[in-house]
Amino acid sequence: MQPLSLPPRLLMGPGPINCYPRVLSAMSTQLVGQYDPTMTSYMNEVMALYRRVFNTKNQQTFLIDGTSRAGIEAALVSCLEPGDKVLIPIFGRFGHLLAEIAERADAQVHTIEVPWGEVFDPQQIEDAIKKIQPKLLAIVQGDTSTTMFQPLEALGDICRAHDVLFYTDATASIGGNPLEVDAWKIDAVSVGLQKCLGGPSGSAPMTLSDRFVSCVRKRAHVEAGIRDAHHQGSSGMRIRSNYFDLPMIMDYWGDERLNHHTEAATMLFGSRECAIQLLNEGQDAVIQRHQLAGEAMLQGVLALGLKPFGNLKHKMTNVVGVYIPDNVDGEKIRHDLLNIFNIEIGTSFGPLKGKVWRIGTMGYNARQDAVLHTLQSLETVLRRAGFALPAGAAVDAAMAVYSGEV
Amino acid sequence: MQPLSLPPRLLMGPGPINCYPRVLSAMSTQLVGQYDPTMTSYMNEVMALYRRVFNTKNQQTFLIDGTSRAGIEAALVSCLEPGDKVLIPIFGRFGHLLAEIAERADAQVHTIEVPWGEVFDPQQIEDAIKKIQPKLLAIVQGDTSTTMFQPLEALGDICRAHDVLFYTDATASIGGNPLEVDAWKIDAVSVGLQKCLGGPSGSAPMTLSDRFVSCVRKRAHVEAGIRDAHHQGSSGMRIRSNYFDLPMIMDYWGDERLNHHTEAATMLFGSRECAIQLLNEGQDAVIQRHQLAGEAMLQGVLALGLKPFGNLKHKMTNVVGVYIPDNVDGEKIRHDLLNIFNIEIGTSFGPLKGKVWRIGTMGYNARQDAVLHTLQSLETVLRRAGFALPAGAAVDAAMAVYSGEV
């Protein structure tokens, strides 16, 4: 049993990516008890920090102890009772995931789709809302499977006008792209740390509006064994999951501190540093850093003679899809990048499998040196695989973006 | 936004407790990609390590990315279809938790109970199995709410004789008490790191027998968006949770590496060290260390004139319940221990709330110095609160246990 030893990879795929050093350092901090005043005070601080990350005043802003899809499932199963109608516009793999989680909750799931590489016009969504009259609109903000970024600004007003709750999964986009929870009137958002926030997978920050809270509070139920005179069972339809029961989780994070799980303290410490990194550098500055890195990577791959995937007008800042050229073995290129240069880029899912690489520029790795190392190395492995390309053009194109020449 | 800074608490409650230093160190390791061969090789190694921790040959041994109750819910919702009968013998708070998770899965839940502080005789359980004929027996091995340890040795044969699956939650007991998954014919076990394994909350190691695997495999279903020609939907009744769908989780940990969640790598690194700590020191040696520390703590509190809770014959090695003496403010004592001595002991739930302290000796803290510091400090705060006690007797009694005099 050897000590843990991992190669120094530069993670330029669609996530997870390398953590910010301050995040890793915090995760080796010794624990205190779960109700220790220092622990609950850090829990409160994390709530306040993520309110700023989400640009919201929502009191109910906290972490779900699990990976990103734990946050999605908590939002959907706590909100949707069997038979409730939900509208899910799908523009990639993660839209399908929302639909399948809602189906398992026995909700009445209605989907609309656009081809992979496109996003929805708000009018399409409003038309579907009028027709279906769902309880909830659930949509992904950024879908790494296609690299697309769905504009959400107009959807909040549409939802309020039709008395629909509005949930979004912003895991892939948060930190590298704008997300204005209150201004855009989004009722529930869940994310993960492992993309532009620069942390490890395993914690899902979430925020809930008062409208969303009153919806799930109707189903509040305190478990037997910790029930007392103040906490009788509720009359609402009980949420099907104990672990993802948002009213119970809110009571754990709230003043009551009613025991639910034992907070994953180490993940909380990491989540805290992710937020501080973003807020200290400044959200606008971090988004701009992602825009620059993403544009530099895009111009670099274009200069290599490669073709980007999807409607670039709606690409996230932090990831680009690149068609694998004809006569090039896409997996061999990825293999060589990893094994010769210690650089990881991503493969694809579903309809894009084997056709597209996905190259990320996220969080800690949204840096000029990371972009340039990746482009140089991609150029080298493509050249050695027999692909004709203009030597040095990729790096020049990327550096031109950084120097403001384009 | 100050750097993370926590007081150096000695955590002598029912968990979480202080992590082993090697666990914390590993958790500041930089990441690699989720399908990096070095990552999948560590995932395989963690499976092998936990087979040894669980004393099993079960192929399906892996981590659930969540706290202990995430492991419980994964086992129960993947196994139990609506209407399925489950027998849950309850001897404390966590038995109620199993029942409530099973109820939310719409299983037909049958419970039997013994008073808090006692455990079941196998005959009581066999009688109930004969009467109810459940699909599953679900029982906690050690319930920290009462400190009791349920003997499981005889239950496996009973379950096989009646064709019942057998699940246990061993979160509170694992590492500090024996658990022989194969020898005792247990079909499914889930645990957490935050007790005798000496890690943080947030990862739930789990092992499944072939019998349990074929039960849940009947409900296998691959989510849309990553389905291809090889992975069509199944005809079984779909598991209600995506996050806790064990067949999908097994396909992620298996050779297929079919994407489900993104493994919480930092928690995996910590889990690995917890297992290595246990296995390097030796399971028998670690259990003996817990026996010694637990016995020393018990003799110490007896020497202080305090009365232990429950049937000591069935106490876990790693935690003791202690009645709060009359005319002593239990919360004031805990407060002084924490604020003057940086030592945490536990309060209680439900029927024991306000009546009993729970003092743990777990994992890294199952050490003579930790026991002695705690007893000395408890003596001091009790004395200063006006409680009459024999000076020095607690430490002498504990040291006598360590020197083999009793």
Image (spheres, coloured by chain):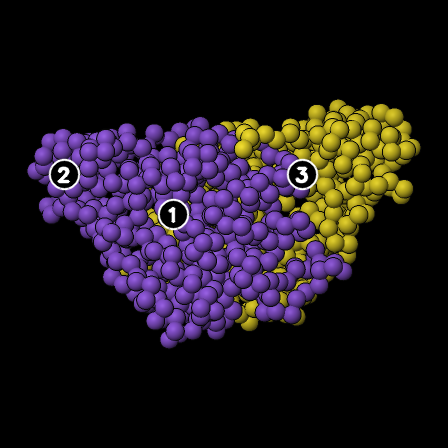
Chain colours: A purple, B yellow
Can residue B378 be seen in the rendering of this structure? Answer: yes
Q: Is residue B384 left or right of residue B56?
A: right
Residue shown at 10%/46% (left/top)?
Answer: A327
In the structure shown, which secondary structural element does the residue marked by tag 3 occupy? loop
Give the secondary structure at mark 2. Answer: loop
Q: Tag 2: residue type?
A: Leu
Disc 3 sits on a residue from what chain? A
Q: Label 3 to label 1, Cα distance in Å?
A: 35 Å
Q: Earlier in the sequence, mark 3 or mark 2?
A: 3
Q: Earlier in the sequence, mark 1 or mark 2?
A: 1
User: Looking at numbered disc 3 in the image, what kind of residue is underneath it?
Assistant: Asp
The kind of secondary structure element at disc 1 is loop
Q: Specify whether residue A189 is in view.
A: no
Residue at position x 35%, y 61% in the image: A96
**Circle nearer the viewer, 1 or 2:** 1
- Give the label on residue A66, or none: none
In the rendered view, does B393 fall on the left or right side of B23? right
Mark 3–mark 2 Cα distance, whole angstroms, equals 56 Å
Foreground: B272 or A294?
A294
Q: Residues within 10 Å of mark 1 (few under 14, many from 20)?
A: some
Earlier in the chain: of badge 3 and badge 1, it is 3
Left or right, A48 with reference to B233: right
> Is residue B65 shown above or below B45?
below
Disc 3 or disc 1, which is closer to the eye? 1
Query: What residue sits right under mark 2 in the picture?
Result: A304
- Location of mark 1 (residue): A178
| Residue type indicated by callout 1 | Pro
